[in-house]
Amino acid sequence: MWGNDGSWVGSEAQTIARAVTNREVSASQVLDDHLAHIKARNPELNAVVTVAEDQAIRAADDLDTRIGRGEDVGPLAGVPFTVKDLIATAGVRTTAGSRALEHNVPRVDAPAVAAMRAAGAILVGKTNTPEFGASGLTHNDLFGYTVNPLRPDGVPRSPGGSSGGEAAAVASGMSVVGLGTDFGGSVRWPAHCTGLRSVRPTIGRVDPDGQYPGVPSGDHLLTNPATMHGTLQTIGPMARTLDDAALVLRVLSSPQYRWTDPGSVDLSRLDITWAPGEGTVPVGEEIAAAAAGAARHLGARPYEGGALSEGNDLFGRLRAVETHTDITELGTDFGNNIATMLAAARDVDRRLVERLWAQRAQLVHRLLGEMGDVLVLPVASIPAPPLGDEVFDVGGQSLTWSQALASCRAISVTGLPSVVVPVGITRSGLPIGVQVVARPWCEHVALAVAARL
């Protein structure tokens, strides 16, 4: 139990699950505490855009009944969780932050959401996202801006994006753990901005279906493997502790892939490299220093390869040849950001697209040959930015949010797993996270190294 008021708000997922399973507290009581906290904090933060109160109450009551019968209800028994509004939730509105989907209520859960429910977790709501996740700053015409719960210097700030609503909900205690999506840094950058832990899994570790935009198939929404979005975007966990993030990842992990306990990793046998950035975009002095400190703590050697510095550019070139058909088929009622993106789309020579994907295959091969077992690098060039700012000064150079996320985009294009963990704070009190990047299917290695930090 957390806090002096007897509330379960702020408790770890494993603590709640153990107490609910052992009947030390009911799932209904834990839920009531979190619903009350949402009502208290959400008007300020605008993180939760749809509260699933009635459905959650029924789920908690059912869980308590099953526990009373002696049933095994799963490793997340009674744990309140939230889901980014890009991910389909059966019976709960899912808008992707777009007027085109303002009244959309899916009939089927995304497989990741179904896995959470099967593990005993209780869905309490959907969290804000930029329209179709196409921004690193969380606001849209439908719901407005989400505010970072951290304000150490008194300045209202963004929680990042596009899983910014999810980060704000978890960091403020409105939910215990959450599901975000990550394309160009969308669970890593918000974790960095709010002091959370997050995991971008290896592509394929978590079933990607159920994400908007996608391919409708009856009541299901499938991932389009012919698009960059469908190939590279993943669903990943966000949590206040690394143990909770690892537990959720294990629940989400597709059963055909073997899970390895991070505790089994012998850190002394790992070849760890580090970089102060991806190599082409400046990184803030305090952030680079924090990454260097983490590297020293791990005994990491400097990364000396050339592949990393090519990743951000390749991400951008692949993005530039997307036609966004999955979005255009949803209608025309889009905000300025999406409208601009669609207007810039153009038909391209298919041979160019295939050459870019071939370059991506070569890039992954070279990076794996250069990085050792683990690569540590910053998440972003800047800490959580002031709310409403769109351009940021780093070392005298003006960066857009996408440029500030170059280190994330360089990893996204490879599909490698990346764990974010906070390693320091700025002079103004803002958290600084680093990425711990591992080889494919080695999330357990990244988690083990992150735990050392």
Image (tube, rainbow, N blue to C red):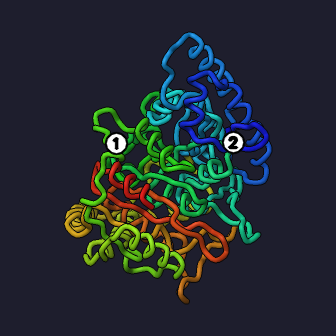
Q: Is residue 79 left or right of residue 445?
A: right
- At 29% from the left and 38% from the top, the residue drawn is 257
Residue 242's x, y, as percent?
49, 50
Q: Is residue 320 depicted above or below 400 in this figure?
A: above
Callout 2: helix, strand or loop?
loop
Q: Residues within 10 Å of mark 1 (few under 14, many from 20)?
A: few
Q: Is residue 358 left or right of residue 387?
A: left
Residue 317's x, y, as percent?
36, 69
Residue type at numbered disc 2: Trp
> Residue 314 or 301: which is nearer the viewer?
301
Q: Is residue 187 depicted above or below 77 in this figure?
A: below
- Indicate which disc, 2 or 1, sits on the residue closer to the N terminus: 2
Q: Name the residue tied to disc 2.
A: 2
- At 48% from the left and 26% from the top, the residue drawn is 74
Q: Could one spot residue 301 in this view of the protein?
A: yes
Residue type at numbered disc 1: Asp
Callout 1: helix, strand or loop?
loop
Q: Name the residue tied to disc 1.
A: 261
Residue 299's x, y, as percent?
34, 70
> Residue 210 or 252: which is nearer the viewer?
252
